[in-house]
Each structure stands twice: as structure tokens, then as C-alpha cells.
Amino acid sequence: MRALRLLFSSALVLALAVVGLVSLPERASAAEERYSVPASGYWDITGRGWGHGIGLSQWGALGAAQQGRGYAEILDFYYPGTTMNTAANSQIRVALTAYTPTDKVTLSPPAGQRLSIGNVGEVPASTGTGRYSVVRTAGGYVVERRDKINGPVRDKFTLTGKDLEVSSGDGVATFPRQDETDGTWYRGTLRLVGSGNVAAAFDVVNHVALEEYLRGVVPRESPSGWHPEALKAQAVAARSYVLTERKAGHFDTCDTTQCQVYGGRAAVVADGVDFKPAAKEAASTDAAIRATAGQVRWYNGAVAFTQFSSTNGGYSLQGSKPYLVARPDPWTGTARGDSRTSWSTRLNVSTVQRQCPPGGTLRTLVITGRDGNGPLGGRITSGRVECTNGSKNLTSLSLGMLSRWWKPTAAPEQQYGFFLNDAWTTKANHVFQYGLNTDEVLVGDWDGDGADTLMVRRGATFYVSNDLKGGNAEQVFAYGRPGDTILVGDWDGDGVDTLAVRRGAQYFIKNSMGGGGADSVITYGRAADTVLVGDWDGNGTDTLAVRRGPEYHVKNAIAGGPADKVVVYGRGGDAVVVGDWDGNGTDTLAVRRGPEYHVKNSISAGRADRVLVYGRADDVVLVGDWNGDRADTLGVRRLP
């Protein structure tokens, strides 16, 4: 837990160069959009779609199904010119990417089954229960069988063939090593295929019937709770797609988004010899597969290449086949719960700067081309970065976004508000406006998630925000009296900051967010003392310290009585802030002298551990752990 933060008077000001203003894009020509680097360190982005946008839109299929459309009609729309046909339940060879390649794997049959292993095309060398660990060396595959995890070796032998076959009566489970407990259960059989490139490596390939394979694909590609007609459309598209992927080598497809996602039958946790399964298949998707058994999309005498993605954003993208067309999609964006057809996010300057030539600093992001289809001008087709050491065409048009259909918003430059930093830099990571200019601002971790946010006070009413953004408060309550001095801290060590009010030398402490009476009342120090709050001993609980000139009287318990420690630091006229500057769990001091800040990482006298110089003296300082990394940094509130 990180405790603390705004410590004494909200009138404390700190000269900071962190202005964090959001820059406007430069005026663009008809062919270009130019976006200068914003001082905030990020662009706000509006985007559409998730994935490549070719062929079936999964969210669009759901929207169509919710409007009463059947799966055949859905497939007719997304693959125009194709028809329905059937295909045999042939074997599919799936490369398991976690083991492609590998030099070791552990294999196990399910409870009550025996595992067989041997060279392909020969009588199995071994058939038994337990766990088989396989390691490939220059001399062949060394196999060891144990009755249980890390049990004694029961059998050990070497197989000198290049490829092995592994089977049981009900599929095979794989584990990375002999001592691993978490694995995956696959239907069908496994082949261990020696790598032609690396002498002591092999690929693990799952040989499984097409219809059984789909049981591990459809619930990975479309949520199993979706409308049955959407699931049927996904089953036919997935069946067709994998049949067009079949290759001449030792596998046809893989198990990731590079092909289509295949999860196998179940996740398993080994318990001795047997394992406990957690199904990756679902009754609803099994039903969709059975209802469409063997059905594929057909074009010009062959199975169609039925590409699909999560959502096309409302306009599909032209693909490599005549039936993969670019056109408006009336269904995408209509499904209940669709949060991916239209979305917003942030694009960090650092992400774009990685596109610069080595050693360069980004100056301008330039979008030089879009396809013109749909809102925002359509998907990005070309772009470049202009950097201090030259320009370079973008090698990634998505830049980590959900698709390449996005655009920075042209927000006006923000001159006032909150500019909060996650590190000791000159650019704010969080820039927003919240509350009124006349509000008193408090900082704390109000929801216990490890990151500090803001609360504003108007009289005796408090408005709590649990995000670093504008908008309405998440919680509103009244506490104390309008003239009370307010302190913030985690008084009971539960990870949540709450309030205390000070009246003279008395402190009325509340351990929950809301109105009502105080949970404890203590007297500490003198009425004229300046009061600081912090976790001085690193025990997770905030307590008080009073300042008298350069002396700090530190108390490590919520109680009256003598201080536990008295330390002299700085000068009597210094302004002081408190924070955990190095993330070690203990709050310490920083003093300000004009534009200089002398940071101390221990509660002790002596020289500062760090001295920083910042610019303006009319900003109100805020201290907080804005990103939850356990270290406090600075932010400012700038008023007009």
C-alpha cells in the first residue's frame, strides 16, 4: 500500500517546469495529417475496429444474429459469391507454439488411461501410466517414465527415430517439464517431430480430427455465451479457414492468432499422476459445431479462404480473394455490449518515437494516407515520423492500437488544470480538469488500488474521483465543518486513505469514507504547529509529525504523548512536502528554496540525497503515486 499525500496547506506552491500542455496538430494539407509532439507525452486517440477487418466481423455476426438473421445469411453477406458445401472430417495437424521448437516435454494420459510412445510407424516402445518426460539429444529421444511428479524413474530408454508418436485412449496432456503441474489436455494424438534446423530440438504437433479440433477453436474465437447463430457462423468460418491452411510440411496450422486460436480440450493441474481438468470447450459451441457438421464455404471448386476478425469497425477491408470485399457493414456496431467497433485510448509519444532512426527524438507524427472508407477518413495506409535525425516511414501502421483505423483527437491546448507526473520528468503523464477553481484539493488512494487520485472539498462536502480524469465524482459525502483543517492518511493500515480534521491540537480521525462521527480523537503537539502526515517507519500506517522551525517531531502511532523521533532538517523558512520518493515504503521530506527542491530519502539530518530545479512559482503542488508504482512523484494544479 502507498499512503499519503497532500500534506499540509493546499496553498503550498512549488516551482515546476511540468506544464504538460496538450499540443494541437499543425495545419495539414489535403494529403497529410501532421501531429506535433504534445507536452503531455501522449495523444488522445479515437479508433474503430479490432484486427485486420477482412471477411467475417465477429461482433457484426453477433449483431446480425440478435436481429434475427441466420448463420447462412450472415456468411452470405461476409463472403459474397461463396456457397455452402461439405468437407470430410479429416485430420488437422496443429503446431503447439509453446513447444515449437523445444528440447523437452512431459506427457501424461488422463486418469484410467495408458500412454503409448514410440517411433512413428512402429510398435510403441512403451505403454503405461504415469508421466513420460522426453528430452532430445544428438543421439535421439531420451524417455523417462515416473509414476508421479518427480517420483523415481520407473523406465528409461532411448528412441533413435526422428519422429515419435504419442497416444492414449482419450488424448494426451502436455507439461513443459517433469516438475510442472500446469498443462493442457489435447484430443487426438501428438507427434514429436525432429527439427531439421536444430539437432537437439523438436516440434510438438497435435493430430486431431477436424470436428474435434473445432471444439478447441470456436470458444476461443467467439465467446461461448453469444447467440447460437453467431456461433454457427464462426464454426463454418473456422472450419473453412483451417482447411485452406493445410500445408505440405509436418503441420497445417498453429494455435495462436497467427493462424486461429486453438486451446485444446482443457487446462489441467496435475495431482500426482492424475490431473484435474478445467474445460476449454463449451456446450454451446459444441452444439454450433454439430449443427453445422462438415459445412464449409465454397468458391470456384475449392474451400474458401474465410478470414475473420473481431470487428471491422463498420467497414470491411479488401482482402486477397474476390469474395473478401471492402464495403459498409450494417451489422457491426449494433450488438449489445460491443466496445470494440468504436473505442478511445491514448498513444504514448514514446511508442511512436521508437519508429525514429536510432538515436532520434520525435518531432512530428505524419499520417500520409488513408483508404477513405468510413469515419475518420478510414484506415491508415501510410505514414512517417519526422525526427531530430531524419524522417522514416512507419513500419507499423497500428502502433499498438487495436487496428490501423485510428486518429488523434484535435483537442484544444489545455492551459489550466492538473498536470501530474509519473516520474521526475518535464512532461505530465496525466492532464485533465476536475472540480472548480475555488475547490480545495486533496490527494489519496481512496479505493485501495495502490494509485493516488484526487478529491475536492467545497465547505464540508467532499467529491471523490478514483481516476485521473475529469467528469463527475464517484462519491460525494459531508464530513466535519467548513473551517476545519483537513488531513489525509491511511490511519488504520488497510490500504485506503481517509480523512482527519484538525481543530487546534485535536485530531478527529475517520477510518472510512463517509459522514458520521470520528473513529478516534487524539491530541498531539501545539495548536500553532505545522502538521505533516506520512508513514515514517514503513509499517503501512500513516501518523503525524509536527514542525517547529527546522525541527520535526515524529510520532509513529496515532496517539498523544512525546514524539518517537526529533530530527532537524533544512531551515525554518523552507516549504516542505512529504512523499515516498524512492518507493521503499517509508515517507520522508523534501524542502523548497526558491526553485530548488532538496529531497531526503531518510528521516535524518544531513545533506539532501537529490536536488532538483524547476521553473514556475505560482503552481499549487500535489504529491502522489499517480501510476501505482509505489514511488511518489510531483504534480501541479495550475489556476487561471
Image (cartoon, helix red, strand yellow):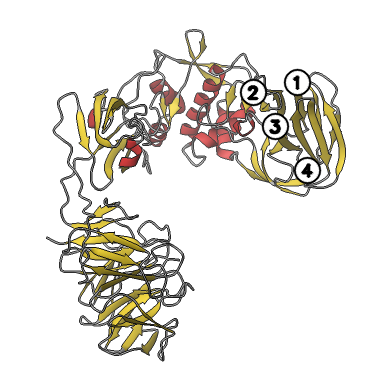
The residue at the point 55 percent across, 22 percent down is: 242
Q: Mark 1 or 4, which is nearer the eye?
A: 1
Marks 2 & 1, CB-CB < 8 Å contact? no
Sequence-first disc among 2 and 1:
2
Q: Which of the two marks, 4 or 3, is nearer to us in this view? A: 3
What's the CA distance linking mark 2 and mark 1? 17 Å
Residue 104: percent from the left, percent from the top? 71, 34
Which percent across, then down, holds residue 525?
Answer: 33, 89
> Callout 1: helix, strand or loop?
loop
**Closer to the camera, 75 or 12?**
12
Q: Nearest the camera: 196 or 582? A: 582
The picture places residue 571, in percent across and down from the top left corner, at 27, 77
Q: Which mark is residue 103?
A: 3
Residue at 84%, 26% in the rendered image = 124
Q: Residue at x 38, y 44 (%)?
A: 337
Percent x, y of residue 16: 22, 59
For disc 4, the marked residue is 111
Specify which label sits upstream in the sequence, 1 or 3: 3
Q: Which residue is mark 1?
A: 162
